[in-house]
Image: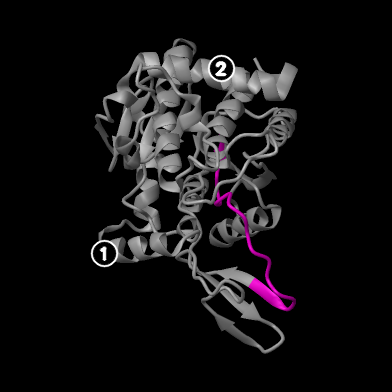
Amino acid sequence: MAALKYAGLEDTDSEEELPPGWEERTTKDGWVYYANHLEEKTQWEHPKSGKRKRVAGGFETAKSLALHGACVILACRSPARGDAAVQRILGEWHKAKVEAMTLDLASLQSVQHFAEAFKSKNLPLHMLICNAAVFGAPWSLTEDGLESTFQVNHLGHFYLVQLLEDVLRQSSPARVVVVSSESHRFTEIKDSSGKLDFSLLSPSKKEYWAMLAYNRSKLCNILFSNELNRRLSPHGVTSNSVHPGNMIYSSIHRNWWLYTLLFTLARPFTKSMQQGAATTVYCATAAELEGLGGMYFNNCCRCLPSQQAQDSASAAALWELSHRLIQERAGSQAK
């Protein structure tokens, strides 16, 4: 049975702890609610922040693949939420082959440990879905000294694929799906001279704007996918990038009231969680895409990304920069 390594079941921004006696639960359609065992009542709003949330669309991708017979590994920052997701899938089909493993993309050491643990299972890896993302997060540095949106949304995935490259090649034919966004069209990552600008990718606190950081990371996703496909397709490993949906309402919106307003206004035009997962599942499984990569998909159809996303020189420069950052921060583990 093919093994799916699924990165990004949940959002990787900080979770606010619940007060004693409270429990977080999730409805079948992904809405989170809170149970107060002391007063025996439930509510939609978080007891501290007062906000509502919905689990990220990645769960629907993992569930769909598991229910169709794939052996699925959910890589999650929170072991508790990962185990809960496994139980939800098993609740729908008790024979599903699904398990959770711990992975925090904000820590290169965690990526190393995950890759080692996965390899110890001696499983094939036919589908690797890079889906984890933070959106609208306040400026912060990871333990590796990089701006968190850049590391979680791009560099952590880059390192993960590097560490699992040999497994992907041994599992050929294999596919990598990198979840990007249409927001990649509204930014650039080059300076006035046309060179890749690291200060735009991992900006200082003074120069940081959350939405721009997200947009730039999504541009990196497409460039990374294209260069990955160029390098690995001769070895039977293809890579495509996807836009999952139009501002899918999930807990990634909760960092700022303006994002909540934008998601609320856009709600009539967004996709359901299942619809949002469809393009990712299509790129991971469609027979007609066997051996084909280096493309960008929206609504299960191939479309052209921005001009900069198609720039092979930018893709190669981003690869070299990412490789250098990994070498500097992860040492001998980097290839």
**The N terminus sits in image quarter:** top right
Residue 18 highlighted magenta (yes or no)? yes
Camera-side residue of 86 and 191: 191
Where 203 sits versus 21, above or below?
Answer: above
Task: Pinpoint residue 54: horizontal percent, then vertical percent.
Answer: 48, 63
Range covered by the magenta-colored residues: 1-23
Rendering quarter of residue 215: top left
Q: Nearer the viewer, residue 8 or 120?
A: 8
| Mark 2 nearby-residue class (10 Å; few <14, some 14–19, many ≥20) | many
The residue that appears at 38% across and 19% down in the rendered structure is 291
Q: Which residue is mark 2?
A: 169
Judge left or right: residue 279 versus residue 43: left
Decide whether the magenta segment is chiefly helix, strand or loop.
Answer: loop
Q: Secondary structure at mark 1?
A: helix
Residue that numbered label 1 is attached to: 268
For the residue marked with disc 2, what is the amino acid? Arg
Q: Residue at x 70, y 52 (%)?
A: 79
